[in-house]
Amino acid sequence: MPVVNRIAEFAPEMTEWRRDLHAHPELGFQETRTSDVVAAKLAEWGIEVHRGLAGTGVVGVLISGSGGRAIGLRADMDALPILERTGKPYASTNDGVMHACGHDGHTTMLLGAAKYLAETRNFDGTVRFIFQPAEEGIGGAKRMVEEGLFARFPCDRVYGMHNMPGIPVGEFAVVEGPVMAAGDTFEIRVQGRGSHAAMPDQGIDPVIVGSNIVIALQTIPSRNIKAQDALVVSVTEFHAGETFNVIPDNVVLRGTCRTLDPAIHASLPDRFRRIVDGVCATYGATAEIDYRQVFPVTMNAAEPTRVAAEAAGAVAAKVVTDRRPLMGSEDFAFMLNQVPGCYVFAGNGEGASVHHPEYDFNDDLLAHGASYWSTLVERELKRG
Amino acid sequence: MPIVNRIAEFADEMTEWRRDLHAHPELGFKEHRTSDAVAAKLAEWGIEVHRGIAGTGLVGVLKAGSGSATIGLRADMDALPILERGTGPRDHRSTNDGVMHACGHDGHTTMLLGAAKYLAETRNFDGTVHFIFQPAEEGLGGGDKMVQEGMFDRFRCDTVWGMHNIPGIPVGHFAVAPGPMMAARDNFIITINGRGSHGAMPHQGIDPVVVGAHLVMALQTITSRNIEAQDALVISVTQFHAGHAFNVVPDAIELRGTCRVFDPAIQASLPGRIQRIVDGVCATFGATGTLEYLKGYPATINDPAQAAVAAEVAEALAGVERVDRAPKPVMGAEDFAYMLNVRPGAYIWTGNGDTAGVHHPDYDFNDEALPHGASFWSKLVEDCLPRR
């Protein structure tokens, strides 16, 4: 039983929804049309709609039977600032904005499940359909949580799903523990003392200090954490100087850290401080560090992962449970930090990877994803 | 006798000229008003004027007696792209916003004009004086261009002389060393091609920022490991351009910087040495690098015999105690080097007193230095081209 029959019946309708969303992408916190479309459909199917959470966020509530359990299913709605190059007939009509991460598909799969579950109500309890804004780096999930998502809409468990190019359609990856990395950004402003390039003895060269910091930061992964733990420190920007013959006053380094271990994550600001201060002291410079812990680790809990794997197994040709975590970061981590749950990957088949201008969500996946959601609800909220 | 009496008499007039030039600064090769002002004054004093050498450059020719000896005296005319700030009242502030005489070329031009006026009046020498007013000293090679356009073929100079003010040396003092005075200056541009990746997945790429950081450090070992300790060499990476997003490791980065050195042999070795470091560090990380090495001004090196002449003239004028015959050379560069490369001569420093450093927005040429400089030029001519 790879796909729920009723869902297979309206798969062409889901494809229409998905392509409509794809043609009208909206950036984070600006998903007004998308939010209207989602709210209208949920209301049409008799689902109670709550709007305005984190601006454009939507929560649909569907109750069946008298059970007290509630689960949350989450999809993201925002697009990316990328100029689309797919050449598809339903390509973006909003130049420079593109659904290049498949959130159009995520939203559609959750709508498909909502339609099916509203029709069939073959469960006992409460389903919260959570449509979040601004997953792409600007913290839509965090804001929903801060604005009381789980206080207003309590959930015993919360689930998320993301498409994955390179995995065949119909295959799922459901892995316990960390699946996406914590993601931080940092900015280090090294203050030296500018001088004529011919007279470095009269100044403190911040380019030398910055270069030493770039190299010294690499020893955090190689010297400060256990070899089997995962940590990436990348200095991605180094801004120094404007002319050949002037040593600048200061330089700015920027970059990102990714780790799968919450304890390592917590230790990074202090380790940065000590390395930067130490290197600066070596050369007589000073530095300001703006270290931002942006995303926590996306951590799948044991029992929800087991249930998710079963639900996926019921609809999927294959379920992988030992896939390596990804060092990218995911906003859903903020929800998993509040409520135990599981984040799964669904194969998007061959094609460009996410965030690529030629990427497109695979419509063949829609029925699989909606079937997974529906089966998961029916297993989590079993009728007595 | 620190100042020639006749020059002291018109010092106030020189101050007016200097402040007029200061109020109307012009960038290199655009010194049209300055060039006109200089030409008009020289002509007024009966000096033969030749214009259009290196664009705005000009040479004034003054002959006295029948001697065949010749001498070239050079001043620079250009200003810098700096917004003048200045502390206290400054009525002669730049009227050309963002352009400023922040290196004292207004004073250099005025001192040479003062000497021209005096020498045209007194003609107490035997031979030919060439007053060389050059454009574009600040990095654009106006001196080089004058030489290339055949200035020394048209205006034979047995010797050629230059002068620069130095903040921090008292007014009325001079300094001149035999050998190096100012450094050679070369620039370089290094491009490192790695392979971009997501900031979270550096193993899928080759991080050029890490390569660049190692390169910055490795380049410092040329100074510390490859040349003799008593030789002077500065290598400064002054620009590091990498990336424009927190989460993307860039494909490529660019480093830019400058080398300063006195010894021509060391200078000649630098492109090869830097290339080997670029290649080696890049190979270490699997990146590739390209080096664009831009040869700039040569070192300004005084002929020891001419340096001694300049020191003697300065000592006769200012007193032995006001002349430093062994100042430490400066690692800055000077395009008078192109003239010294083809003619014997010397480059001498004159005190500007306790002012802001050159190229600083608060800097101003010290008008009290004007008669000292003009007196030096005049005495130098009278000593080098003595009447029989």
Image: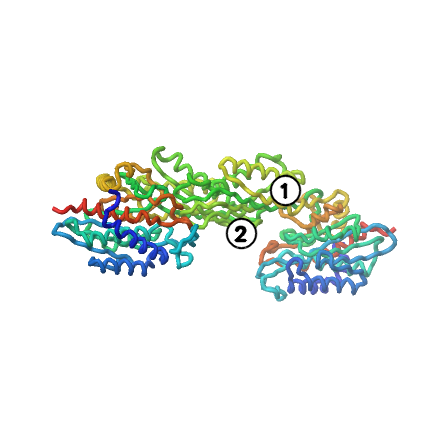
In the rendered view, tell whether residue B47 sits above or below residue A324.
below
Splitting the image into 4 quarters, where does residue A55 fall? bottom right
Check chain identity for marks 2 and 1: say if they share one. no
Q: Which residue is mark 1?
A: A259
Amino acid beneath label 2: His
Identify the element where label 1 is drawn.
strand
Q: Tell me if I can see residue B332 in this picture.
A: yes
Label 2: chain letter: B
Instruction: Give the distance between the C-alpha atoms of the residues marked 2 and 1, in whole angstroms.
Output: 22 Å
Identity, as a three-letter code, of the amino acid under mark 1: Thr
Which of the two residues, A192 or B286, is positioned nearer the viewer here?
A192
The answer to whether residue B54 is seen in the rendering is: no
Residue at the image point whose x is 36% and y is 39% from the top = B233
Dot in front, 2 or 1: 2
- Residue that carries the numbered disc 2 in the rendered image: B244
Looking at the rendered structure, the secondary structure element under dot 2 is loop
